[in-house]
Amino acid sequence: MDNIYFLVRFTPFWAVPLALIAAEFSYIFWIRKKKKRVFACLVLTFFALGCLVFYYWAGGPEKSVEFLIDVIHFFTR
């Protein structure tokens, strides 16, 4: 669980580069007409952007981890 908390706490450090790289590759694959790869890269882009939105909606590094812990405790009890 510590690894997941670490990823949630430092979301901007992995989600921003992942979204930029996946968006660029989706454009490259779109030019080459590789539809399955375009779809995979776009899904990865929107996943990373969704994680960023959650991170800022939850309140940053400390509050996002606390929110995740509360959700886990709610569903495991």
Image: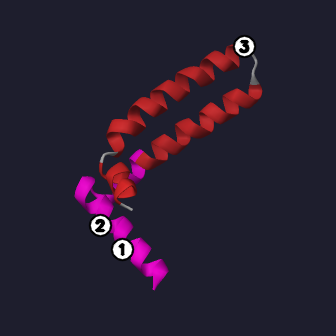
Which residue shows up at 75% across the image and 21% down it? 34
Residue 12's image quarter?
top left
Relative to 37, residue 66 above or below: below
Label 1 vs 3, first from the N-terminus = 3
Which residue shows up at 41% across the image and 39% down it? 15
Under circle 3, the secondary element is loop
Q: Which residue is mark 3?
A: 32
- Report whether 37 appears left or right of 21: right
Tag 2 and tag 1, C-beta contact below 8 Å: yes
Residue 70's image quarter?
bottom left
Verify whether residue 26 appears in magenta: no
Q: Which residues are magenta?
A: 52-77
Q: Nearer the viewer, residue 77 or 44?
A: 77
Q: How is the image coloured?
A: secondary structure
Q: Which residue is mark 2?
A: 66
Query: What's the amino acid at mark 2?
Result: Glu
* Crowd class of label 2 (few under 14; some 14 to 19; many from 20; radius 10 Å): some
Query: What's the amino acid at mark 3?
Result: Arg
Which residue shows up at 38% across the image and 65% down it? 68
- Report whether 33 appears left or right of 70: right
Query: What's the amino acid at mark 1?
Result: Asp
Where is the N terminus found, in terms of image quarters? Answer: bottom left
Magenta segment main secondary structure? helix
Q: Which residue is mark 1?
A: 70
Q: Position of residue 56 (x, y in %)?
A: 33, 51
- Which residue is the extreme one toward the top? 32
- Which residue is the extreme one toward the bottom? 77
* Crowd class of label 1 (few under 14; some 14 to 19; many from 20; radius 10 Å): few
